[in-house]
Image (tube, rainbow, N blue to C red):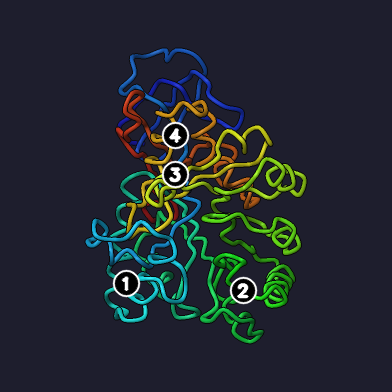
Amino acid sequence: MGRESIVEGKILVETGFQQGYLRYSENEIIEYGKGKSPKPPTHQGIITPLFSNCHTHIGDSFLWSKHATFPHSIKALVAPPHGIKHQALEQATDKEILQGMITSLKYMAIHGTTMFWDFREGGYKGAQLLHKAAARFPSLHPIIFARPSTLTYDKQELNQLLHIADGIGLSSINEWNQDDLLSIAEQTHQQQKVFALHASEQHREDINRIIELQPDLLIHMTQGTQKDFQRLYQHNIPVVLCPHSNTFFHLTPPFTLMKKAHLRILLGTDNAMIQQPNVLDEVRMLHKKKVSTLEELLMMITFTPRKVLNSEACIHFPTSTSPFVILEPESLQPKQIITFEQDGQKK
């Protein structure tokens, strides 16, 4: 069984924080108890499942070294097809893009992320590259939202994308013809894949057009109104906030209004070219602003994402083989990331 350890502190479970302890070996969690540990703990801290980063653009990681020089303009930097990012992706070699991805994936893994939801540019080839990069990291599980190579609907291309990806992730509806969007959304839903899109990031967009598409997930909604959020709640559409990215573009996520509307809120890091993909940074930023409790914020990167995806993984945490993170309570920095061997693989 190997040497045993005990960690004691606040344990994040599906219903929130519980004071308790975990006794574990290098192979499994042996005991989960509430209250004080019967033996002196080896470690103390906040214990949570591994994290989900619910919005990334890992493909632009190779541009990170230039982030200090980028304009703070959505249109100039990231809007397709002429933004600096998209021009750079067109000109970059597969090797450059792949190496950038690998760097970001390694960064996520060592900071406690196990699942990331990526809007992957570059059509079918772009999704293939991300699969190739992620294959090097068994502990990471990519949820790939592919994107058509042009801003038009192509049934054959979409079938190819849906074959290799978990869904489709599009840019702003204002860049698309509504009929094309409806065709893409319908085909994606028919294949029981996720349809996601950026929405009302820089300018408020028509909430009726958005809801007509029946999206499974929206990104940003920084320009949304209280009525918009109420409509999203009525249609059970969750929203991913990316506080550091929003701040870079001089935007403010309307966190309080979204909470008031009882929206399901998730957190992501957005473009890896301007923000390293550590979703705990988003938690720390919002925690400092005191817009929500730490318990609620940690839920947004652990249990809530799994529920949005209808994934059983993590929801029954802690089980005997659940990997977990021990956070330092004040800094919220990972003290340790505990994983276990499963099926002969280090997870």
Residue 211 at what x, y percent from top left? 73, 58
Asked if the residue under mark 3 is in contact with the one under mark 4, i.e. CB atoms within 8 Å, the reply is yes
* Cα–Cα gap, marks 2 and 4: 33 Å
Q: Residue at x 32, y 52 (%)?
A: 276
Residue type for callout 3:
Pro
Residue 127 visible within the image: no
Residue type for callout 4:
Leu
Kindly state the secondary structure of the residue where label 3 is placed.
Answer: helix
Few, some or many C-alpha atoms within 10 Å of disc 1 (few <14, some 14-19, many ≥20)? many
Q: Nearer the viewer, residue 74 or 3?
A: 74
Q: Which residue is mark 2?
A: 176
Residue type for callout 2:
Trp
Q: Is residue 241 above or below residue 119?
A: above
* Cα–Cα gap, marks 4 and 1: 31 Å
Q: Which residue is mark 3?
A: 243
Few, some or many C-alpha atoms within 10 Å of disc 3 (few <14, some 14-19, many ≥20)? many
* Cα–Cα gap, marks 2 and 3: 26 Å
Q: Is residue 217 above or below residue 182?
A: above
* Cα–Cα gap, marks 2 and 1: 29 Å
Which labelled disc corresponds to residue 98? 1
Q: Residue at x 54, y 42 (%)?
A: 314
Q: Quadrant of residue 130?
A: bottom left
Q: Which residue is mark 4?
A: 286
Residue type for callout 1:
Leu
Kindly state the secondary structure of the residue where label 2 is placed.
Answer: loop
Q: Quadrant of residue 212?
A: bottom right
Q: Nearer the viewer, mark 2 or mark 3?
A: 2
Q: Nearer the viewer, mark 4 or mark 1?
A: 4
Residue 82 at what x, y percent from top left? 42, 76
N-term mark: 2 or 1: 1
